[in-house]
Amino acid sequence: MSVFALAHIGFVIGAYAIALVAIALLIAWIVLDQRALRRALAPYESRSRGLRDLDGVEP
Amino acid sequence: MPSLTSLANPSRFMALSARALPWIAAVTALLFALGLWVAFTAPEDYQQGETVRIMYLHVPSAWLSLLIYTVMSVSAIGALVWRHPLAEVSMKAAAPIGCVFTFLCLVTGALWGKPMWGAWWVWDARLTSVLVLLLIYLGILAIWNAIEDQAHAARMAALATLVGFVNIPIVKFSVEWWNTLHQGASVFTLEGSKIAPEILLPLLMMACAFTCLYVALHLAAMRNEILRRRLRRLAILAASETPAPARVSSLEGGARA
């Protein structure tokens, strides 16, 4: 590796590190959002399933 | 064979996307592993040295920023003309993803520009039009968050998206229309690619990996938006059912008192 290449390696590492963090945050945001929504939906869905069971309708 | 309309039904979309997502995620991981390996074993550029490896992030991010905006614009037409709920969902889900990739394009571009041009930023046509694209993305996100009525927000966001589409050809052709420090098109040109195959291969592999990642993220974000709408509808239904007896009992209590 040349001296020129070594002088600029920090820019390469910085670019990959920022990309990794940005993409990881985006994935984490979507996954956590989905978990929160599933948790919030759970009581409604169990209730509607219960009502369907009472009506004799297949869930 | 199912029609496009039946495939675009939210319930069917949830079922299909649940089956497709693990496969797309696996392909994305495989493409990233291969792409990064090829990117870091490819020879360095004879002029740019190691900094050419920033291109494997910068160019796919730039392509995605334009692709995602185009997907948003097609969805905006679907939302405005056919009022299709899945088009609204697609438009809303794509905006933050496009915003992140545009931000990545600008940041990796600055990190590439400093060692190559001697400047983090120059106000040339390509850089400025991509910055405008980021601001348009942020404006559309602001519309979605500022307007409470989702149907109204969807109409406003769709209109803003379609107006903002004017910027897409400006970004693409800015390097031809004006004298820019940013280089012209070099991958897809009428004369063929101007890039050496040793550098073109990792670039295309990383572009495929980024595109698969976007597809997976967009599907997942669309699923979230459908769940959010279902939650809102169920909460409204529950609210309209439960307070009624409470109101009656309080009125009864008041009458007795």
Image (spheres, coloured by chain):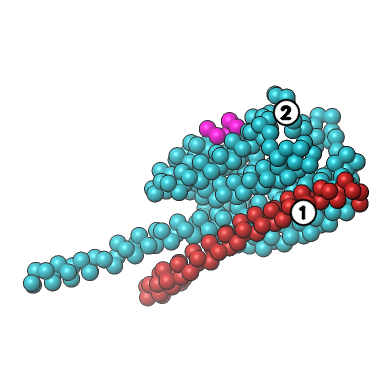
In the rendered image, the vertical position of residue B77 relative to residue A56, given as above or below: above
Mark 1 surroundings within 10 Å by alpha-carbon count, few (fewer than 14), some (14 through 19), many (20 or more): some
Q: Which mark is residue A13?
A: 1
Which segment did they paint magenta? B163-167
Q: Chain A in the picture: what colour?
A: red
Q: Secondary structure at mark 1?
A: helix
| Residue B104 placement (x, y as % from top left) | 67, 47
Residue A22 appears in which quarter of the rendering? bottom right
Chain letter of disc 1 in the image: A
| Drawn side of residue A1 relative to residue B118, left or right | right
| Residue B135 placement (x, y as % from top left) | 56, 39
Identified at 72% across, 62% down, the residue is B26
Q: Chain B in the picture: what colour?
A: cyan
| Residue B172 placement (x, y as % from top left) | 68, 32
Say whether residue A56 is visible: no
In the rendered image, the vertical position of residue B4 relative to residue B185, given as above or below: below
Please name the amino acid that badge 1 sits on: Ile
